[in-house]
Amino acid sequence: MREIGFVKWFGGYDSTRGRENNFGYIQREDGSQIKVYREQLRCEETCLSEGILVTFNVKINSQTNKAIAKNLNLFKEVGKLKNFCNSTHPNNYWFIDSDYQDNILVHKKEINCSELDLQSGKFVKFELQRDGNECKAINVHLLNKEETDSDIIERCLSHKDPRFCAFGLWGYLNNHSLDEAVSLASQKLNRYALWEKRRFLRDLPEPISLYFEVESLTPVLPDKDQRQLFLQILTDDFTKEIDDSLRDDIFNIINKSQNLNSNLCNKVINKLYELYLDAPEHRKKLNQELQIKCLIELISHVQNDSHIKETLLNDLQDILEVSTSISLWGLIPNYIILEKQIWTIAPRDRRIGILVSQISNPKDLSHQDKFLEIAKILEESALEEIPSLISIFQDKYWIKSHDAILRFLPHIEQITILVDKFKNNVNDHEFIIARISQLLTENLNNNLPKLLSLLPESVKKYDEILEFLPAQEKVNILLSKLKKEDAVENKDIIVKIANILKTFSIKEQIELIERLPKWLKYQEPILQCFSFLPPDEQVNLIWSLIESDDLSFWHYLSRKAKIMCVYRLQKESKNTSNFLKALDKIIENYPENDSLVRCVLNIIWVKENQNSANQVFQKVHDLLTDYVLQQAKTSSEAIDIDPLLPLCKPKKVKYCVAKPWATDEDKQLKTNRVSRAYCPRLRTDCDLFDSKKTDTSSYGSSYGARLYADCSQDWRDWSLLELFEIADIVPKIKEMEKPEDYVPKLSGWVNRINEIRLRLKCSVCEDTMPHHPFYATFQAKFRVTVFSCKHGIGHDRNIYLNDCWGCEAIIDSRESKYKSPEKRYYICIHCGSGAQYSNIYTQGDICPKCGTPGMTVSKGNYRYRQCRSCNHQIKLPKDKKITGPQCPQCGTRGMMLTVNEKNQQVRVCRSCGYTN
């Protein structure tokens, strides 16, 4: 048995003897060393550098009784390349897997092949050299089927991978007979698992693999002579004269074998197809695939006999018509498909492919019938088939763009081609535009934006296309169609532009109107769009006309825009008298009936008529209160009197309700104005609004109280405060002590009405529930607190609405469903308050959302409590409003109900922690 070792040293000059050494040492795998003499080398001595792996036999020297190596040769190995990417030298190093060792490192310079062949998975042969404790591969070559090195062939044949073994048989067959090679292959097959056999047979030399394929037919060809005949036909140039007996034997062999190995039978038929020409009865015994292959060979070789060819084509047609296998059509060459018997039944993709190959010159009129034939095939096809059929001529523009075929393409591609035709065919514009319009109609809910992006402006200008464009683009194109200012034909275009403007977003409307020519901007159809814009933008758009005392547009403005016009007029100190005179002329034809607009017009009229200030204020007050009361009675929507009332900057409510809250310094100075305000909604102080302050971030949510007029601020933010200041009006009503309370109380009144009224909608049908509350001036308390929907059962019934005494939020029994222990008071869902003076109920004893007892105390803030069941959170009112039992230890009111570790309900003092 041969061993493997590596060269320690060999030869070299011996100075003591004055000659070259004729021996060396090999280190064996067990670590011992063995001597080898030059005469035992079976390789070139120059190859034996230190570390080279070698193979050898071991012999015991009879004289010294020591082991020596004989028949020493290089160790040659085979393996498979495997990629290894080195970050410093990419692709310079690879790995080789082999039976001897996995992951043997090899530098690219040691691989002797083309860069193109240097691929992972390639089979290689190589030698090994010890490199420290590891081995590296050297002298690496690609393994090929012409291998002659017996060592390499032997390594392949003994390899555990069947593919290497099959590779080795190519070289083995070069030096041995087929019988010997077959015998060796049989031995290997017997040792392989099923998956290894498949891999082995796939890579065998054809003579051997054919032998095994034929041998695999033993179950149907038990006669060895028949198998040998079969193999002979396959491997030799079969020249034997075929008589009737031999012909019948061949037919018999094929009939028996066809279902077991159709491939082998097909090879025989390719050689001996003529046997079937005069034996149709035997041909029809073949399976469909072999019959078709046989008929193809026969048809191809009987071109001169039309009668026989006709018969054979009819036979082929019969087979194809009854066959359900599409793959059989892959056997039919194009020249046979063109035959009339086959053409009509051929698959559509084959027919289209042939027609496309025949259209060499699209301008040749003789090809027109082929275009129409392609269109006919597409027409007959199912929708799901068409994309794959079109792909056959995807790169043939002259075919796709043909009018008969174009309609079958994807819509995006149709549009692209139609646009090209539009540019190049002036006479066909009408037809092209009609077709594009049809495509856009079919894509209204799908790819419309994409299709439109493909159209040039020259196409978009057509009325049939214009209707599909986005509003912005449509307007731009319409603008390009306008003639000079007074052109009669402009009228319809202006109306179209105005109608499109109404479909824009507010931002888009503003941007577009600003870009319109001045003569167009104030055309009546455009002015009619103004009321849809934000009020300040309406003012900006028509301000140049106001400055020239032209108020012909006044009735087109919205209520808020009209009020803001007055604000800006006063802010910029324009001539109020001229404005009112110009407005009087307009009002003659368009009376001003809006109560809120009449309020501001009356106020600025006082500037010219100071003696009537008190009477005018009372009139304004009546207009405002009547408007609010009327809206409260007739509408279910929130009452909006913007921009008359100042807005709440912290946005706790809509309108600012701040109250004066004098500081100690204010009291000492005895000033008419305080420097601080109190916000009832924030329940804390709120810094006064100051338009000179540009950075208010440090105030958080407590900034912006509007107690006094500030005419220096932007006119967009003005309110009644500034108008009263400009007109020198001091609000006076008998229900109010201080004039500065008027606007905040008016704001609070409107806020409260809105909060309650929004809850008067049935949660089922959203109809407003019938109500007849009395809205006292500057109060929004209901005298009626229980409401029911008029639709009866299944809708909101006996809904309780009232103010929470604890946090001033609204208690709505639809959300605050649970009552405190007194059974009369609904628990507020916001703060948990029940009866106002209860000695038995503390906020948080019961979750107001789900009714679970004992809400837990928040770790971060003791004023917050959270439900253990549904996680609903409440914020307790201030300490002075906390109800419930008093602590017997420290006297603190409001001992909290909670659950201890034993799941028992107990009360705990919020202050000292006493538990009972």
Image (spheres, rainbow, N blue to C red):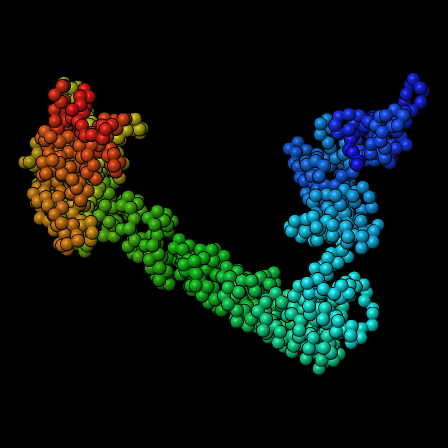
471 relative position to 633: left or right: right
| Visible residue check, residue 867 | yes
Q: Residue at x 71, y 39 (%)?
A: 99
Q: Identify whether 3 is placed above or below 628.
A: above
Quadrant where the C terminus is found in the figure? top left
Name the foreground residue: 189 vs 616.
189
Q: Position of residue 693 (x, y in %)?
A: 28, 28
Name the outermost residue toward the bottom. 307
| Visible residue check, residue 370 | no
Q: Identify whether 274 is placed above or below 53.
A: below
Q: Identify whether 512 is placed above or below 675.
A: below
162 relative position to 907: left or right: right
Q: Position of residue 174 (x, y in %)?
A: 83, 51
Q: Based on the displayed image, in which of its 4 quarters is residue 316 positioned?
A: bottom right
Name the outermost residue toward the right. 18
Name the foreground residue: 326 vs 859.
326
Q: Residue at x 45, y 57 (%)?
A: 447
Q: Residue at x 18, y 56 (%)?
A: 589
221 relative position to 325: left or right: right
Q: Position of residue 310 (x, y in %)?
A: 68, 80
Q: Based on the displayed image, in which of its 4 quarters is residue 242 positioned?
A: bottom right
Q: Based on the displayed image, in which of its 4 quarters is residue 855 positioned?
A: top left
646 relative position to 835: left or right: right
Q: Residue at x 8, y 41 (%)?
A: 776
